[in-house]
Amino acid sequence: MSSARTTRASAPARPEDERLPVGKSFGYGLQHVLTMYGGIIAPPIIIGNAAGVTPDQIALLIASCLFVGGLATILQTVGIPFFGSQLPLVQGTSFASVATLTAIVTGGGGLPAAFGAVLIASLIGLLITPFFSMVVHLFPPVVNGVVITAIGLSLLPVAGNWIMGNNAKAPDYGSVANLGMAGLTLLIIMLLSKVGSAAISRLSILLGLIIGTVIAAVTGMADFSKVGTGAVVAFPQPFAFGLPTVPVAGTISMVIVVLVIMTETTADILAVGEIAGSRVDARRVGNGLRADMLASTVAPVFNGFTQSAFAQNVGLVAITGVKSRFVVTAGGVILVVLGLVPVVGRIVAAIPYPVLGGAGVVLFGTVAASGIRTLAKVEYRNNLNLVIVAVSLGFGMLPIVRPTIYDKFPDWFATIFDSGISSAAIMAILLNILFNVITAGNTPDASVFAAGPVRMVRDDELEALEEGDYFQGGKLMDKDGNVVEVVTPAVFDEAVKTGAIQRVPRNGNTAH
């Protein structure tokens, strides 16, 4: 009796509060780090290259982002009063800000302007967190889907430049060797994704980068001669690129991006809470968002960028069933340690650009596909959501397909709209307000689907349905959450003939 009483007393009140042995915690934590590692090192590489900094400085950016991401993860999972959701959420540099930051650094302000825009925009995000629920309705799936899709599509030209060699003045730029190495890396990633091991499949991008780099080194396409130069262990130097400056137009763009990041983090908090089976209320969401914004505000001090929750790690929690937030805390500690070892950043910075380009196709394409998946959940009937998506994506792609389209406009305008993500986000927000928030004047049945044929269902097709059946994710489910198989008429009739199932007509009498 006392033993059972002790067991019940020691059980955590919340699933995420479970404490595993230290060894297991760091083992599962390392898995979280490996799952998101490719995503956390890509933004500093992209932004650093756009800013034209040296490989050593890119290594510093990578180390800084690992360090800040680790601190942000620890804050989010452990939590302090008013900061941290205390859920198993991994934090890292947000992809949502990459396109906008690239436009800022190439607009003449360099990295100090990027850091300044991040600092001010994140501080604004921190201040408006208590009121965010008042504007979150301006970011429904039709807006978020457009923004996420635009992020992926806007970054694909970066992958194309990497594939060709990154340096347009180099003699081998666009060579068959560069394109071949990128293609080989892409092929390796695809094959690793197909193997029977779920762990290898999840790490396919990271493993593809490693294998591609080894092949490049053997063929003389990689140079690791500078990896050994510099400190092996070092604390990230604050303001290593100079004090931040504040570009007005760039900061406005970053505020929009920060609102998108807050919306995504809210979704991740709700999702991981549901996966963990833990109650998530408005206060907990607010604490999570404040941790997000505080980390993003501090990040520029240590040469980092905006922070957000990583959705792929939310999926990892669901796959492994390990819900302990302290496991993710261990992952945060690993990230901090990696950030204190700049030699890791120098190794990553030495990866050949064609290898990065091959992986970039998958990485950036996955971002775009995630946006498309979000857009697939949008209701397009009896509204103008299709027009919102079409115009917003088209407007966002203009500076991508015609980079000089805004060259004759004022600098402040070009800084905002040269970014495909900013262009798409602004248009999607405005059109959503015009058509979905301000409903006065909307024409009934304005959707392009309105002219389509009326949907009908035969009454005999409803015979198999029972009370409580529902559709979810394209599947027919019964009231207990079990999948009800949907088959062709021929298969159904054959099953009836063999007695595998019974036909139940609407009058309730069973007929075989």
Image (cartoon, rainbow, N blue to C red):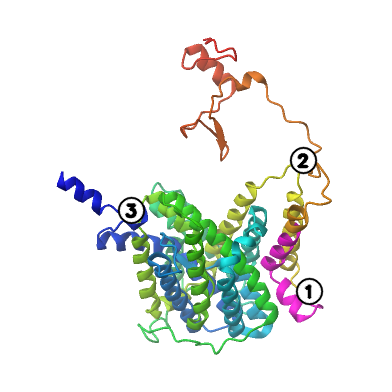
**Vertical order, 114 against 41 (above or below):** below
User: Foreground: 303 or 56?
Assistant: 303
**Real-space Cα distance between discs 3 and 1?**
56 Å
* Residue 202: quadrant of the picture: bottom left
Side (left or right) of 166 relative to 495: right
Residue on which disc 3 sits: 13
Does residue 427 appear left or right of residue 337 in this picture?
right
Where residue 310 appears, as percent x and y from the top left, is 49, 61
456 vs 187, nearest the viewer: 456
User: Is the residue marked by circle 1 packed among few (<14), some (14-19), or many (20+) residues within 10 Å?
Assistant: some
Callout 3: helix, strand or loop?
loop
Left or right of 435 on screen, residue 124: left
Q: Secondary structure at mark 2?
A: loop
Label 1, on which residue?
Answer: 406
- In the picture, residue 174 is in which quadrant? bottom right
Q: Is residue 270 visible?
A: yes
- Identify the mark at residue 449; answer none if there is no mark: 2
Q: Are marks 1 and 2 in contact (CB under 8 Å)?
A: no
Instruction: Judge whether residue 412 is colored magenta.
Output: yes
**Amino acid at pointer 1:** Tyr
Dot 1 or dot 2: first in sequence order is 1
Q: Earlier in the sequence, mark 3 or mark 1?
A: 3
Q: Nearer the viewer, mark 3 or mark 1?
A: 3
Where, quadrant-wise, is the N terminus in this rendering? top left
Q: For the point 27% across and 52% down, which residue is it?
A: 11
User: Which SS class for mark 1?
Assistant: loop
State if disc 1 and disc 3 touch (CB < 8 Å).
no
Cα separation, mark 1 vs mark 2, equals 35 Å
Asked whether the viewer can see residue 161, the reply is no
Magenta-tinted stretch: 406-431
